Image (cartoon, rainbow, N blue to C red):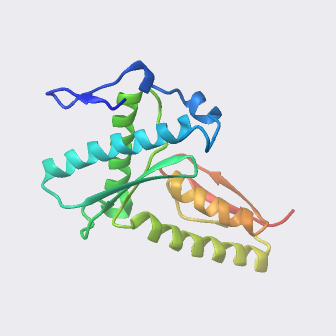
């Protein structure tokens, strides 16, 4: 049942639309019964975030097309635009927009969202750079036998590095406090 919008732009949500994170995690995927509750909930998250971001773009008088999809148990929203105003320095504006979109989803659904936002392909470009950085760190650790400490990164970036390090058969850990939290790549024990 689609949500109806009031004149103030605040969504009205029926009790059937509110799905807890536990229900999302345990919902079975079944092709015979149509989309699972998990898929429906993720699609709903993406649509809520897309509506919110579209309104924000209209208010700011910025151009951009919005695409949504679900992958890896997350709703993804992508703003396709030529400019980098919505990315900001080191992705700071992008991170803020993602948090605002997650709050919009939580306000409507009643549960925390792991929604991932990308603007102008920034995250995908950043992913490639971080994968190369992680490969360089792995090579350095293998050659020298010494730990390598990388520059501070946000959680999204650290996850990418940890995944590359794990795939290479090494161990990594995060150290420090936000916003100075960084990945340390350790030599084999």
Relative height, residue 107 to residue 42 (above, below): above
Q: Is residue 115 above or below residue 185?
A: above
Q: Is residue 126 above or below residue 49?
A: below
What percent of the width, then of the height, locates residue 64? 23, 61
Q: In which quarter of the image is the N terminus?
A: top left
Q: Is residue 38 left or right of residue 167?
A: left
Residue 92 figure quarter: bottom left
> Seen from this angle, which residue lies furthest top?
15
**Image x and y of residue 36, in percent:** 56, 38
Quarter of the image with the C terminus is bottom right
Q: Residue 10 is drawn in which quadrant?
A: top left
Q: Residue furthest bottom?
A: 143
Q: Which of the pair 102/94 is nearer the observer?
A: 102
> Who's the residue at 18% across and 61% down the image?
63
Residue 41, percent across and down?
48, 37
The residue under the point 21% across, 47% down is: 56
Instruction: Judge by depth and name the residue closer to the eye, 155 or 113.
Output: 113
The location of residue 134, given as percent across then percent down, is: 62, 70
Does 179 sit above or below residue 142? above
Q: Which residue is drawn at 64% across and 77% down?
A: 136
Q: How many marks?
A: 0
Residue at (39, 67) in percent of width and height: 121
* Residue extending furthest toward the right: 189
Q: In this view, does 76 lie to the left or right of 188?
A: left
């Amino acid at each position: 049942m689609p949500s109806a919008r009031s004149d103030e732009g605040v969504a009205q949500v029926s009790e059937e639309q509110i799905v807890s994170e536990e229900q999302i995690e345990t919902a079975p995927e079944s092709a015979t019964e149509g989309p699972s509750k998990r898929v429906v909930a993720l699609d709903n998250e993406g649509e809520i975030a897309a509506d919110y971001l579209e309104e924000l773009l209209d208010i700011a008088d910025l151009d951009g097309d919005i695409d949504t999809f679900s992958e890896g148990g997350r709703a993804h929203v992508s703003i396709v635009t030529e400019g980098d105003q919505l990315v900001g320095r080191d992705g700071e504006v992008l991170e803020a927009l993602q948090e605002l979109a997650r709050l919009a989803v939580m306000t409507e659904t009643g549960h925390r969202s792991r929604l991932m936002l990308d603007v102008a392909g920034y995250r995908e470009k950043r992913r490639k750079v971080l994968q190369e950085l992680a490969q360089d760190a792995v090579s350095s650790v293998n050659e020298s036998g010494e730990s390598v400490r990388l520059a501070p990164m946000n959680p999204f970036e650290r996850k990418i590095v940890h995944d590359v390090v794990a795939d290479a058969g090494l161990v990594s850990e995060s150290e420090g406090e936000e916003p100075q939290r960084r990945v340390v790549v350790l030599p084999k024990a």
